[in-house]
Image (cartoon, grey):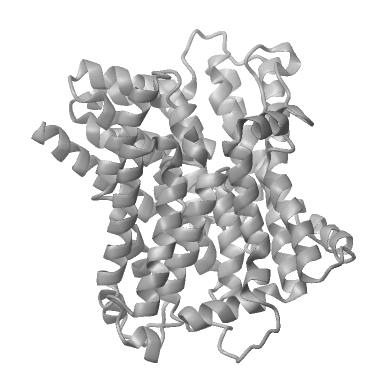
Amino acid sequence: MIFVALSAVILPMILLGILNLPATKGMSISAIVVMILGAVFWKMHTKILLASILQAIHKSLPIIWILFGALIMLRTLEHTGAITRINIGFEKLSSDMRVQIILVAYLFGGLIEGVSGFGTPAMVTAPLMIALGFSPIASVTLALIADSTPAAFGAVGTPLTVGLSNVSENTNFLNSIGKSLTSIDLFAGSLMPTMLVFLLVFLFGSSKEPRLKEWLQFIPWTLFIGIFYSVMALMTATFVGYEFVSILAPFITIIVAIITIRTKFLLPKSSFTNPWTLKDSTGQKEETSDMSLLTAWSPYILVVLLLLLSRTIPALKSFMTSVLNLSWTNILGIKGLNSDWEFLYSPGTILTVAVLLGLLIQVKSLKSFIPTSINVIKSMKNTAIALIVTLIMVQVFTNSNFNSANLESMPMYIAGFVSKYFSAGWIFIAPFLGALGAFVTGSSTVSTLTFAQIQSDIANNANIPQQVVLAAQLIGAAAGNMICVHNIVAVSSLVGLSGQEGTILRKTLAPSLLYCLLVGIIGFVFISLG
């Protein structure tokens, strides 16, 4: 039965990662097989399967809406010339792609994660990186990997507030988890900028260049940025509160990073005299623009401000979550089968509003919005199909607790099986279980909501600190964002890489597993030291 329960994990790995099938085919096959196995072995009723399909279709709509917002943002900025001006701004700050990957994917993406979540960061940063001259495959891979460390805290602490709600809703308890999480990440998460530059140079650089040297000379700066980010995260969790870790840490680190670049602190001279670029970089020609840098960045600034205001002002949040609420509760009359879509509160709506305001700021006209929107919608067909079939598999997997075989849900069955045989060294398993949940569900919050209780129970039974185990769950779930299939599908479609999801999965798998292994080792050291 364990192999049946693991089918939602094994099939995508084989079909996408090994056989390299496009997501539309690979995930369609996976969804059909998981539905059949659910009906035969878990005795899931036809009504439950149908409700899961409807739930999946409804859940895909907010993701598609976010994808639309990200695409329309990119196309509009290309139309107004803002992308050209942003590119020039980066060139003046630093044209070295090793610097740009940290500024855009890690820090700016981290800030977007802190105010939005929902897979939005990679959708925003991957197209921006392409405009800077990164190849599409490098942009998607690195954007997904970078959206890991900040995802442990997600949008205003949601993975803790919601994800741990089955364990405790006590603020002091959640803050203690936040402190444990940032303490572990002080040693694991601090390495993320160094890992990103390593992957950029070794996976996507030219074999003719001395790649080891190109990476080693950047380690002092990337370690400084990673450690500074992690220290800021720890200080925020300790003195402010877990809800603001993924907002304040990247925001303050962006400022410090820009200062270090301008003062050339810890950066090699070659990054200024002979900056590193990709072999297929398209950003080598001289470009000019009359637009101010502030005007060019205005849509992105508006996105951050609107997301931040909507998440931190209670009255505004209440309004945006209650008006035009398109959520569907108790689908087909089945209690507990719900799908949320608070339209005004959605990052997709905020991205679209920011585009409209950006057009008024940049060109003082909205004439291009409708034709651009039509072209974007036409380009999203295959992505919508891939997302829907992926989510069908996910919802059947998670809804398998509705069965007549008196079995736990497939996720809980997996967790129970693993805990039975591996509880002795559970701190090493905890982050991988978190990553497994995020890989299938696409959400660090849902992964934690699913597995937090069993992680807590095992920690208590094994007499190991509950905070350390739950912190490992959250970091592991964040690492699972790198390999989540529907995140990969969504971001790939943005940059014209539909059909190459398996290639991207293979590139993000090793960093995800390495991150989880580091967390397990550091967690073990923490426990050993008492």
Say if residue 123 shows up in the picture. yes
Seen in the picture, residue 391 relative to 401 is either above or below; the reply is below
Residue at horizontal 31 percent and vertical 87 percent from the top:
269
* Depth order, front residue of 464/162: 162
| Residue reaching furthest to the left | 529
Compare residues 411 and 281 and report the one nearer the observer: 281
Which quadrant would residue 335 be assigned to in this image?
top right
In this view, 451 is above or below 479: above
Percent across and percent down for residue 292 are 66, 77
Q: Quadrant of residue 125?
A: bottom right
Which residue is rendered at x = 50% and y = 65% of the image? 104
Residue 294 point in image, percent of width and height? 63, 70
- x 59%, y 78%: residue: 87
> Going by the image, does 58 lie left or right of 398?
right
Q: On the picture, is 362 further left or further right than 84?
A: right
Q: In front here: 415 or 99?
A: 99
Q: Is residue 308 left or right of residue 234?
A: right
- Residue 92 lies, in percent from the top left, at 51, 83
Residue at position x 43%, y 40% in the image: 153
- Residue 498 visible from this viewpoint: no
